[in-house]
Image (spheres, rainbow, N blue to C red):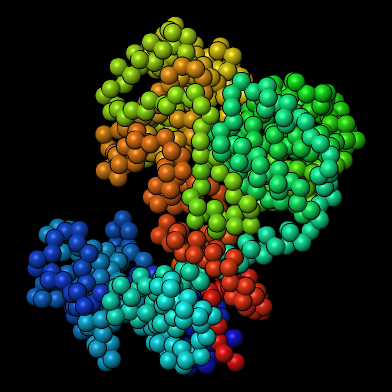
Amino acid sequence: MESLSNISVFNEEQLKALYKKGIKDVQDLLYYFPRKYVDRSQLLDLKTSRVGDVVTFIGIVSGNEVKYGKKRRLIVTCLTQDVKIELIFFQAIPYYQKLLKPDIHAAFSGKIDMFHGSINILHPEVEILSGDELMHMGKIIPIYRITDGMRNNFLTNRIIRSAVRKTLDLYSSRIVDYLLPHDLIKNNLMTLDAALENIHFPKEMQDVENSRRRLAFDELLIFAVIMYEKKIKRRSLKKSQPLNITKKKEWASIIQQNLPFKLTFDQEKAISTLHELAYKPYPFGALLQGDVGSGKTLVALLCALEYLEEGIQVAVMAPTEILARQHYLNFINYISDLPFLQMDLLTGSEKASEKKAKLDRIKRGDTLFIIGTHALIQEKTEFASLGLVIIDEQHRFGVEQRDTLRGKGIMPDLLAMSATPIPRSLTLTLYGDLESIILSEKPPGRMPIDTRLFNEEDLPNLYRGIKKYVDMGRQAYIVYPLIEESEKITWASVMTDYHYLEQEIFQGYRLGLLHGKLSSEEKDRAMEKFKQGVIQILVTTTVVEVGVDVPNATVMMIRNAEKFGLSQLHQLRGRVGRGQHQSFCIMVKSDRITSEGEERLKSMVESEDGFYLAQKDFEIRGSGELLNTRQSGISEFKIADLRYHSELAVMAHNMVEDKIELRQKIMSMKNWKSLIKKGFILFDN
């Protein structure tokens, strides 16, 4: 790749500073996108502006002075439109003191404030105007992120702009677009050279959006190819424990015939898909997404039985001991009508002798069905014939943990499950190498959960309502966003309210406490007591979000509901409504709720569709709130944001699947996987 020294704009020290920033060649420079833009074509009149307005204006520096007080600061005085403005700098004082000398003309952008009757702006964007720069008075100016290391070597926005301009002039004719004109027109995409030109030097702000769209598509396309390659690589492998397609299976049929309910259409379709995948010669990977209460566990069991009936081991890994134990008990209940099937629960809290006996049985192959926690991936855990790995709440595990469990067998199949619905664009991007299976229906007979929104002033009446249902023999959750009271955050907290609730509000009732600072044993003990009915009202944080199935719990109260994401609220709501009685989700909002927060909570009242709420949550809060994306590579996108580019993710996925020539062209490029970090650009020779 062409060296930055060819641009002849930077000195040696500046090149070193750029190198430390990761800008090592002309490609890196072209993909060093502006962090924002100053629209000098829309200069505002300061005389009509108000406090809080963000303005851009041209001024002449009349003086600067360093002052001392609680904190050292530089005050630069400038004049514009016969108005005196003070520019305040708390950082990089020597740099700005040298830059903003008297009689300097500059463009300033920032938020207007007032202090002691004077107009001031804190840390405005600064652009010195002289010579050719005066020609940019009516243009949109890109503003780049200038770090201290760059600033110390006098790398200004003007120098970066000049270098980018020169690079584009030298190399734009050599940029080869890997997309055909037909595809560009069909998908409303800019050419690559036009996108790079307009992201740096737009004529209007719409140019920026059009450029971002094209460049975001490039990133998503590379990611789609990576996912496709992983899928193809898996299909080239051969599993060590193939199922015998000629051998008749009966166990799954026995269980289905004895169920007290009929499987939903989605469940039957999912089971059929998984059975078809199970008999493939290569190890499959599938993501089973199901809304709260959609019956994922039963689908997973009916898939597992295909392996177990042939004497092939199946491992189910859950994120907590509570959930692992619940799966274990549910599975025992389901398989009670089958011939003897050895099943073990493997966790970290067992006695050494008991654990050793289980590990021996698993290693010999005596135990076929193993349910556990992280204990499954410990070094001492060895399997005789692991053929299927089931990961529950898969987003709570890292990539390495999932791979470690799969590594306990030789090319076993993988079924990942998620009770947190994931928007389609995110599924294609993060899990494009997996077969996506969705359960959106709930089993028949489940009553809708009565979801309502209240103010804090309604709490006395709400507490009386909880007493009413507890007196009827029901149980209730009260969920808080914080464990302890905070001076900085005015949210309700478990520790602050627990004793008040126990001694003042619910005297004579049996309360329990559950939060993240308790030990695993204490958490398990609290949940077990709640499940057994010993605890009537569980005061808790979100550690109860994914956990034990308590059919007798019919009331879920959530304090400061506006502090939770929609997906999290939906998960909490899913803790009730699992029995035969009407259940309620009571969301209590504070009087400090924003209009946006109010709208989100109204969405919860209006809908029980987890996929709809997940999409809405994703659009508001982004992917990090939905699932752990750090290890996926998605956090490394420079410009793509799936909240705004969701249709591009689908487009990229479809293009990779359909266009063999395009896929081969990308995969034949040298170090093509690194393009996800460097950007996507092709130069001719």
- The extreme right residue here reads 364
Which residue is rendered at x = 38% and y = 50% of the image? 620
Q: Position of residue 607 (x, y in %)?
A: 38, 36
Answer above or below: position of 498 versus 517: above
Answer above or below: position of 526 versus 249: above
Q: On the rendered image, what quadrant is the N terminus found in?
A: bottom right
Q: Pick the residue in front: 242 or 400.
A: 242
Q: Quadrant of residue 115?
A: bottom left
Which residue is rendered at x = 30% and y = 17% of the image? 460
Which residue is rendered at x = 58% and y = 60% of the image? 633
Answer above or below: position of 146 versus 651: below
81 relative position to 353: left or right: left
Answer above or below: position of 597 versus 661: above
Q: Position of residue 140 (x, y in %)?
A: 28, 78
Give the total number of marks visible in the rendering: 0
Q: Position of residue 292 (x, y in %)?
A: 51, 34
468 relative position to 410: left or right: left
Q: Quadrant of residue 573?
A: top left
Q: Can residue 616 be seen at all in this image of the molecule?
A: yes
Q: Can residue 517 be seen at all in this image of the molecule?
A: no
Q: Position of residue 399 (x, y in %)?
A: 66, 51
Q: Pick the residue in front: 13 or 548.
A: 548
Which residue is rendered at x = 29% and y = 39% of the image? 598
Q: Pick the residue in front: 212 or 68.
A: 212
Q: On the rendered image, what quadrant is the C terminus found in?
A: bottom right
